[in-house]
Image (cartoon, rainbow, N blue to C red):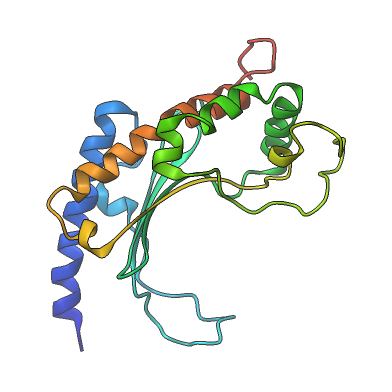
Amino acid sequence: MHKDEYDIEYAFIEAFANGLLVELNMHDLIDTATGKKSLQRIYRDTRFAKEKIPYKNHWAGSFKRATKQRRGGYYFHIEPGNTFIGGGFQAPNPQDLNRIREDISADARPLRKIIGSKSFKDTFETLKGEQVKTTPKGFNANNEAIDLLRYKQFLLIRRFTDEEVLSSSFLNKVNEVYKHMRPFFNYMSEVLTNDGNGLEL
């Protein structure tokens, strides 16, 4: 019944995603070919949902960084009253998660410097993501970096008001948020693509 309206709105979000992809490629190398390919489907998976509403009430998309030397990904979620820009590692595989924890356990100073910087705090406030409640298997509960070792997701999130989303500068602001993710991505990429002795995996 609302297909014509949907097509109009889809054209808007596709144009936004295309513009964002152009900006991202100015300062990073992105594997996602087009803005359209970044967009998530509008259909909800209702198999296990209590509410059987067939469609999402938000737009969302993600961009993958190119080559195995560039880890991390960019995400956007646009919804009235709940718009946010995200990035990081939502579901690292067990091997990657263990490598990250091993590096933090050995020396947490590089990561603490990044998440403690003014630009990071002003943009993302704190590192976010699910954490284990106790101590990760194989690590010492007395480790001075136990607060970081408990993370099993490593997410950077910046929220926007509806007024900011509707402003003409929104795309540029989103791109600036993505730029502020780079020190974190650079750190994680080095951890996940080197063996600890500077040799590429």
Q: Out of 110 and 76, give the one closest to the viewer.
A: 110
In the figure, residue 175 lies in which quadrant? top left
**Residue 61 to residue 26: above or below:** below
Q: Out of 118 and 73, give the one closest to the viewer.
A: 118
Q: How many marks?
A: 0
**Residue 73 to residue 179: above or below:** below
Q: Out of 99 and 34, give the one closest to the viewer.
A: 99
Residue 59 image offset from top left, x and y in percent:
32, 64
Q: Is residue 179 visible?
A: yes
In the figure, residue 60 lies in which quadrant? bottom left
**Residue 87 to residue 142: above or below:** below
Residue 137 image offset from top left, x and y in percent:
86, 43
Residue 176 image offset from top left, x and y in percent:
29, 37
Q: Quadrant of the C terminus?
A: top right
Q: Quadrant of the N terminus?
A: bottom left
**Residue 187 to residue 62: above or below:** above
147 displayed left or right of 56: right
Q: Is residue 66 visible?
A: no
Residue visible at 22% across and 56% down in the picture = 164
Residue visible at 40% across and 83% down in the picture = 54
Residue visible at 44% across and 75% down in the picture = 44
Residue visible at 70% across and 28% down in the picture = 104
